[in-house]
Image (tube, grey):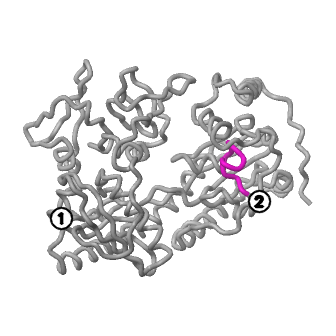
């Protein structure tokens, strides 16, 4: 039988006292979190206000028995993570730690490490088949890591539940390289001990090796989509485009490229080089098709969408493409109504939501920015910086790719590997001697933003030049 008695915490350090005081205030409803790190403060906010997790919960709940994951992801990711984790166990055990693998829902699948620590962990249900998502237990290394791009450490009083304040946990998510959704979480936890400085490096290395395997599969899938596109183009005079499971364009013929605002007949086999069509209803239709086709390989769907150049919706047919039994994307043909009718797109996918905000971080506070206030976002290593009417501040969003996806339906465009700009804030377009484009923004400093060659076509189409 599992013990539900809360463990007595150790005397708190000065840092611990500060974090615990902030935690106590936040639990009582005060939004002033003092020196708590922004990523922890935001997780606390989700835990309290969105998930309504009891901060005095003493153990994790039982996880659901069935989860909906792609079989290829299970095979590749969990096998590779198991191998990588096995190589870490000796080092982890040295400091009394345990290594844990969980799935995308925060369900613990396996754990290894110090036997005494494993026994203590069992008192809190930190064990296989229990749920450690943020939704279930609030801020913690496993669940919070699933929402971040880089290794994350949750120290003692930074956990949302007081019963876990004797734990320090480091976690990292492994993400699908196409859809960017989390597949698994790798976590190292220790009880009443300091986490080694090398822990984040161990996790980052394990995640990088695992995702490199996924990139190989994604590139192979891209090649399969190019082949399916060529086959479809030879049989139809209609606009044809091949997209991956997330809705990004792998290759489009001349007419389809104009409708979607992407380059024509340029294959993007590598998932890092694919184009975002900036049509939310189109992307939504493709993502819906991906969910249906993953369960029914014979499924073919149809819908109607608005494109960049038409005032009336155009019919499309979405036909899934598989490689070795695994869904890799779809061939979409315009002007064809054939297959199961997709649900009517949500109105918010057709026009931007005026209530949508961008969250910035200034000192210890989160700043809710209206979209017109944000001029551009710029990546700087692992951080994203916002240039706004309230000054420059760090974005709460953990990556430029994520911010790009969030704002793609709201008048923002990825113009360079490092920049996403608010198109309504572009004042001038400057052409340089070698044909390069530079955007001049409407701030007092006339900030200049370079446009990469691969994004130039999309920029011209979006700005109508």
Note whether residue 220 is visible.
no
Position of 399 with respect to 450 (left or right) is right
Note whether residue 301 is visible.
yes
Inspect the magenta stretch and tell me whether residue 139 lies in it: yes
Q: Are the residues tagged 2 and 1 within 8 Å (C-beta)?
A: no
Q: Which residue is mark 2?
A: 62
Q: Nearer the viewer, mark 2 or mark 1?
A: 2
Position of 185 with respect to 216 (left or right) is right
Considering only vertical position in the picture, is 148 above or below 251?
A: above
Foreground residue among 194 and 364:
364
Considering only vertical position in the picture, is 381 above or below 279?
A: above
Secondary structure of the residue carrying tag 2 is loop
- Stretch in magenta: 131-141
The residue depicted at 64 percent of the width and 49 percent of the height is 143
The residue depicted at 73 percent of the width and 30 percent of the height is 27
Foreground residue among 245 and 156:
245
Splitting the image into 4 quarters, where does residue 66 fall? bottom right
x and y, in percent, of residue 379 in the image: 38, 38
Circle on res. 256: none
Question: Which quadrant is home to the C terminus?
Answer: top left
Q: Which residue is mark 1?
A: 265
x and y, in percent, of residue 406 in the image: 42, 45
The residue depicted at 57 percent of the width and 31 percent of the height is 38
Inspect the magenta stretch and tell me whether residue 326 lies in it: no
């Amino acid at each position: 039988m599992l013990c539900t008695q809360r463990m007595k915490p150790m005397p708190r350090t000065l840092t611990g006292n500060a974090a615990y005081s902030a935690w106590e205030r936040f639990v009582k409803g005060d939004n002033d979190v003092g020196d708590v790190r922004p990523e922890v403060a935001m997780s606390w906010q989700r835990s309290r206000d969105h998930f309504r997790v009891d901060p005095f919960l003493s153990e994790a709940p039982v996880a659901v028995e069935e989860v909906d994951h792609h079989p290829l992801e299970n095979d590749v990711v969990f096998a590779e993570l198991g191998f990588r984790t096995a190589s870490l166990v000796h080092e982890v055990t040295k400091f009394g730690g345990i290594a844990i693998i969980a799935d995308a829902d925060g369900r613990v699948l396996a754990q290894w490490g110090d036997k005494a620590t494993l026994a203590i962990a069992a008192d809190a249900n930190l064990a296989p088949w229990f749920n450690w998502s943020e939704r279930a237990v609030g801020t913690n290394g496993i669940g919070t890591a699933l929402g971040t791009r880089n290794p994350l450490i949750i120290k003692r009083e930074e956990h949302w539940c007081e019963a876990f304040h004797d734990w320090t946990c480091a976690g990292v998510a492994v993400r699908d390289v196409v859809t960017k959704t989390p597949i698994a979480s790798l976590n190292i936890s220790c009880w009443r001990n300091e986490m080694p400085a090398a822990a984040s490096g161990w996790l980052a290395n394990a995640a990088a090796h695992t995702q490199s395997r996924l990139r190989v599969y994604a590139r192979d899938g891209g090649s399969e989509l190019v082949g399916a596109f060529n086959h479809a183009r030879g049989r139809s005079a209609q606009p044809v485009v091949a997209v991956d499971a997330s809705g990004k364009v792998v290759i489009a013929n001349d007419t389809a490229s104009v409708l979607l605002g992407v380059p024509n007949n340029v294959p993007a086999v590598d998932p890092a080089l694919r184009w975002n069509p900036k049509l939310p209803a189109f992307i939504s239709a493709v993502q819906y098709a991906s969910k249906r086709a993953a369960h029914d390989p014979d499924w073919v769907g149809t819908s109607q969408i608005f494109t960049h150049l038409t005032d009336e919706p155009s019919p499309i047919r979405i036909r899934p493409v598989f490689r070795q039994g695994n869904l890799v994307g779809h061939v979409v043909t315009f002007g064809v109504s054939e297959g199961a009718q997709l649900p009517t797109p949500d109105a918010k996918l057709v026009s931007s939501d005026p209530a949508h905000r961008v969250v910035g971080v200034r000192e210890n506070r989160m700043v809710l920015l209206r979209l017109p206030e944000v001029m551009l976002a710029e990546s700087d290593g692992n951080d994203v910086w916002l240039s706004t009417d309230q000054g420059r501040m760090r974005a709460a969003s953990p990556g430029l790719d994520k911010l790009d996806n969030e704002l793609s339906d709201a008048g923002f465009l990825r113009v360079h590997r490092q920049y996403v700009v608010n198109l309504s804030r572009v004042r001038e377009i400057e052409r340089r001697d070698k044909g390069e484009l530079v955007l001049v923004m409407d701030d007092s400093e006339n900030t200049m933003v370079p446009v990469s060659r691969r994004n130039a076509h999309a920029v011209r189409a979006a700005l109508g030049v």
